[in-house]
Image (cartoon, rainbow, N blue to C red):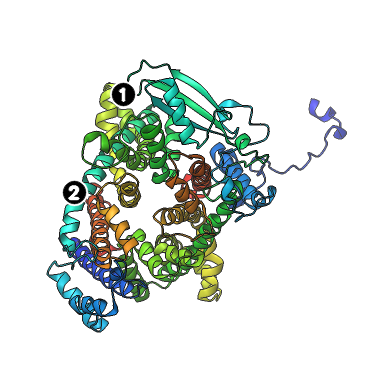
Amino acid sequence: MDKEKLNKDLFVPANRKEDTSEEIRRPSLSYWQDAWIRLRKNKGAIFGIIVLFMIAVLSFAGPHINKYGLDDQDLGLSKMPPRVQGLENIDWLRLNGTKSADLTAATVEEAQEKALARFTQTDFEYITFDVKNEGNGQEDSARVIAYFYIYDAKAVDEYFWFGTDTLGRDLFTRVWYGTQISMLIAFIAAIIDMVIGVAYGGISAYYGGRVDNVMQRIIEILVGIPNLVIVILMIMILDPGIISIIIALTITGWVGMARIVRGQVLKLKNQEFVLASRTLGSSNTRILAKHLIPNTLGMIIINTMFTIPSAIFFEAFLSFIGLGLQPPEASLGTLINDGFKSLQINPHIMIFPAIVMSLIMIGFNILADGLRDALDPKMRE
Amino acid sequence: MARYIIQRLGYMLMTLFLIASFSFFLMKLLPGSPLKMEEKLSDAQLEILYEKYGLNDPVPIQYLRYIGNLLQGDLGVSFQLSNQPVTDILLSRIPVSAHLGLQALIVGTIIGMLLGIVAAIRNNSWMDYSANIISVVGISIPSFIFAGLLQYYVGVKLGLLPIAFWGTFPQTIMPTIALAIFPLAISARFMRTELIEVMGSDYIVTARAKGVTKAAILFKHGLRNALIPLVTVLGPMAVSLMTGTLVIEQIFSIPGIGEQFVTSVMTDDFSIIMGTTLFFAFFFILVILIIDILYGIIDPRIRLAGGKE
């Protein structure tokens, strides 16, 4: 037989290899790592983070970048239009420190006379005109746009980046200071809402039974109260100030959070890991704090992220109807409200705080949307 | 269903009672008085006025009288507007606000839904992206900033539309746009998400396999099912309309209920404040009730009875 000729040495023991077909080839990711990866892919959310980061840095650095203080009044320099070094030569940005007026009259000359009255000048030294329509002698047929070089007229060599307000205070300083205050109010209100809401919702759902019943009936009554009206009534009673705005915002603000947390805890509390923990002798407090709340953290964060912009909005809203902070305090809302009063002639006083506020709101909203997509387990593939 | 609605109506009444009491006691704590806003009155004159309006009685008596009058539909008289009954003032102002609110709601949801449909059927195109940007901007930027900018650029700079007051149709355009932005944005976003989800479901594939035309699929099968969850945004919309009327009526000098409320807050006219508060609360509760009932009708899987999740 041929077989017997085979040399035994040809036989080598096979290397023992472990079965690799079921090996986990990627590092296992925690919930938060996974969420971060998904958040990073979301361009909108990243844009939101960048915008908010820049605004946060500016709101702290802004009031100290230039030499003007929050409350440095100079009535001689009131309502100065914005002028920025370097950008003053780019015409369409209109950051060159000129005031403009669109004037119509029977003839060009009459329109130009109107410009003198508008800018309270006696001659045309600092005024240039852009004649849009020569006119034919009929009423309002001639149209000129007048540009008034107010910085030259007042021989001011300073640069007010966002201009000044009606009392001659530097708006750049005030806008960033106001941003700080608005954000402070929003953050504190959101945190208080979160603490009360999580505690209330968590207790209500976890203990269940009669406790839950009573607590839910209270919520059902509170839900019907329109937030806005209560906030306004509270502000009327309290002295206007940061603390009273925060109290007013939080007095019914926590209800939404409480409902969400309750729903989540109800879902979780009968799952096996909670049962296991209880069998091992954990106390109720420990189960709530170590198991139930951490597992609802995603929802809590999402909800808080939506609370912050709505708190900023409410604060601005209160200030807008005259129930906000009192001068010399400033928030974005009071600045917009001040600007609104002189919007027709000096639009810059409203436009800068309005832009900053809009950016904050957009930033928070798209970041919150991104976080919802990243943290909500239902979205997981 | 009937039992559920009755139960809910019970809560409604409790909430309203609570708000009525709460606003009454808050107004008693008010530091100012509407009577002191007028020309200087002597102490004796003030005393006579306080006596006339029963403001010298102990607070519990005043409270019981207020609740008693309330049950008879009497909201008291205004202090600023020469003894006019609050009920009359509210009734004269509610139609204006309702007109503005409904107009904004209709314009906003229709345009928003069209935008959402376009974004959904042209998913991931430039149209989708621009619709997305519009809805994010619309949800984020407060209506009073919109109103201010509209008033300045469209009204003052371009002179296209009247900048204030109420009555003629052109005067309603700008406030309607400012108020419609939020409903527009939120319904566009919602429509898009829902429609994309519905259009990917099996019954749409079946319909397509049967050879149903694209338009019929979209309108008969897609849209109908995507519309259902739109009910959820009614709540935020109602809130935004309420907030909106307060500021937008102020900005455009519209004689609606929001403007009246803000003016009364400024003059401490507490009987109007309490009346308006009750009205807002009533409106809000009604919207919540309608939403919950609609849910039950539209989606039978949501159990109404017992109110348990």
Residue placed most toward the observer, B3 or A4: B3
Give the SS element for disc 1: helix
Residue placed most toward the observer, A350 or B112: A350
* The disc label shown at residue A302, or none: none
A26 left or right, relative to B154 = right
Q: Residue furthest front?
A: A122
Give the SS element for disc 2: helix
Residue placed most toward the observer, B178 or B240: B178
Say which quarter of the image contains residue B55: bottom left
Can residue A85 be seen by looking at this rendering? yes
Q: Residue furthest bottom?
A: B58
- The amino acid type of the residue labelled 2 equals Pro
Q: Tell me how many marks there are.
A: 2
Which residue has dot 1 on it? B209
* The disc label shown at residue B95, or none: 2
Q: Which residue is at 46% across, 35% downward?
A: A117
- Residue A125 picture location, percent across and down: 58, 28
Sequence-wise, the earlier of marks 1 and 2 is: 2
B198 left or right, relative to A158 = left
- The amino acid type of the residue labelled 1 equals Ala
Q: Which residue is at 35% across, 75% downward?
A: B29
- Residue B198 picture location, percent across and down: 34, 36
Whether residue B158 is situated above or below residue A23 in the rendered picture: above
Say which quarter of the image contains residue B117: top left
Whether residue A193 is situated above or below residue A5 in the rendered picture: below
How many angstroms separate mark 1 from mark 2 (CA)?
Answer: 51 Å
Q: Badge 1 sits on which subunit?
A: B
